Image (tube, rainbow, N blue to C red):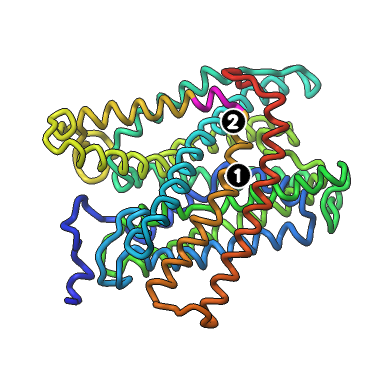
Amino acid sequence: MDQKRTIEDIDGGDHARQGTLWSATAHIVTAVIGSGVLALAWSVAQLGWIAGPLALFGFSGVTYYTSTLLANSYRSPDPIIGERNRTYMEAVRSYLGPKEVFMCGVAQYVNLWGTMVGYTITATTSMIAIRRSDCFHRNGHGARCEASGTVLMVVFGLIQVVLSQFPSLENITWLSVVAAVMSFAYSFIGLGLCIAQWASNGGIRGGLASSSAVSSSKRAWNSLLALGNIAFAYTFAEVLIEIQDTLKSPPPENKTMKKAAMYGIGVTTIFYLSLGCIGYAAFGDDAPGNILAGFGIYEPFWLIDVGNICLILHLVGAYQVYAQPVFATIERRIASQWPEAKFIHRTYTVRVPLMEGGPLSFTLSKLLLRSVFVLLTTLVAMLVPFFNAVLGLLGALSFWPLTVFFPVSMHIAQRGIGWGAPKWVLLQSLSMLCLLISVAASIGSVADIVDSLKLATPFKIVS
């Protein structure tokens, strides 16, 4: 093949690709460091001082390694001069069979949509936490401070309706940059609060093994759920190809993406270890499920409010990182189904401040479809306000296929690694180990869902 194809869009170029190492790193940090970072102290508490940090390191290493394999699958058959695969499913279709494509589509898009629902609930929880924090400050920590989040959830949904009209990820790089900065901000705030609590204790809490404050069966379920939380906290494979499709070339996109993954996951791991371990040292077995919203800490209330505001702003941007690939896939299918329909193809333009790449262009079909999709997502979040437990299950189920199985299988096909070869055995062993972890974490998540079902009330988001 002609080497010039490394700097050309082989499939003709359906959009401008101006992404850089730093924009890709921002997208990764935005996608990876979500609300789950504030639950890591609880997760480490369920595993103890030995298994907790090892789990954080283990998932970090697996995620980075398989990300490098997935980055090589962006072009096929050659990772540098092959044809582009604009989505995860296109990459699977290029290397594997139709059965694997179907499995990938189900796992990827259910997880993307599930994350959107979970982020809607989590952002609402932070809004409620701000109200409760102010109430506790005024009336004392023993006061009954309840707040309904239904209206707040609707407000978050309407914000996402507006942001969803941006055509694609490269048009909202600024939003991912803001969201990444916010993730650093609330992570530092949570870390600072944990350090202050740790210092006030005068010692390190927690034990080498898991929490002894509950029954042995409950400890087992919580340990499995903790693995699911950590696995979900690291997962971003479902948007890796879509992020890579925003990168300009040269240098080759896979080299840029590997560096971005190294920087993004490296920064994430530092934050995860810091918050998880210091939070456990500060609270021990009593570590709250959310450092900022679980009220293991009440003061300074204004700093807790700032942290929750940063978390909300981060989720506003992270929501779009997961939503845009869903929109793009649906719209491509609709456009190919009705190629002559003016309602679908007639384009309108409007200038929007802060938007990169010129005026905002849209069609009436996109305006309607994206708005309806976001509103339906918000409705589902209202119907199942315990969905964080369901999201843990989605994370456990999607970790193995999206983060491990498909990248490993595509790498084997791309490199022509024969059955029984040493590298084949090592890769398949890694895949089977991660499958067992996903199954175990799913069991723990199901147990938590059963408990949540006993307390859930549709359309009543109260904290």
Q: Residues within 10 Å of mark 1 (few under 14, many from 20)?
A: many
Q: Residues within 10 Å of mark 2 (few under 14, many from 20)?
A: many
- Residue identified by numbered label 1: 36
Distance CA(mark 1)–CA(mark 2): 13 Å
Secondary structure character of the magenta stretch overall: helix
**Tag on residue 126?**
2
Measured as percent of width and height from the top left, residue 375 is found at: 41, 25
Q: Nearer the viewer, residue 286 or 67?
A: 67
Q: Secondary structure at mark 2?
A: helix
Residue at image position (37%, 70%) is 255
Determine whether, in the image, residue 392 is placed left or right of residue 360: right
Q: Vertically, is 146 above or below 228?
A: above
Q: Is residue 200 visible?
A: no
Q: Amino acid at mark 2?
A: Ser
**Tag on residue 160?**
none
Q: Amino acid at mark 1?
A: Gly
Q: Which residues are magenta?
A: 380-385
Q: Vertically, is 252 above or below 375?
A: below
Measured as percent of width and height from the top left, residue 135 is found at: 69, 19
Measured as percent of width and height from the top left, residue 81 is found at: 25, 72
User: Quadrant of the rendered structure where residue 286 is?
Assistant: top right
Residue at image position (58%, 41%) is 35
**Quarter that holds the C terminus:** top right
Determine whether, in the image, residue 458 is placed left or right of residue 27: right
Pick out the residue farthest to the bottom. Answer: 422
Determine whether, in the image, residue 231 is placed left or right of residue 48: left
Q: Secondary structure at mark 1?
A: helix
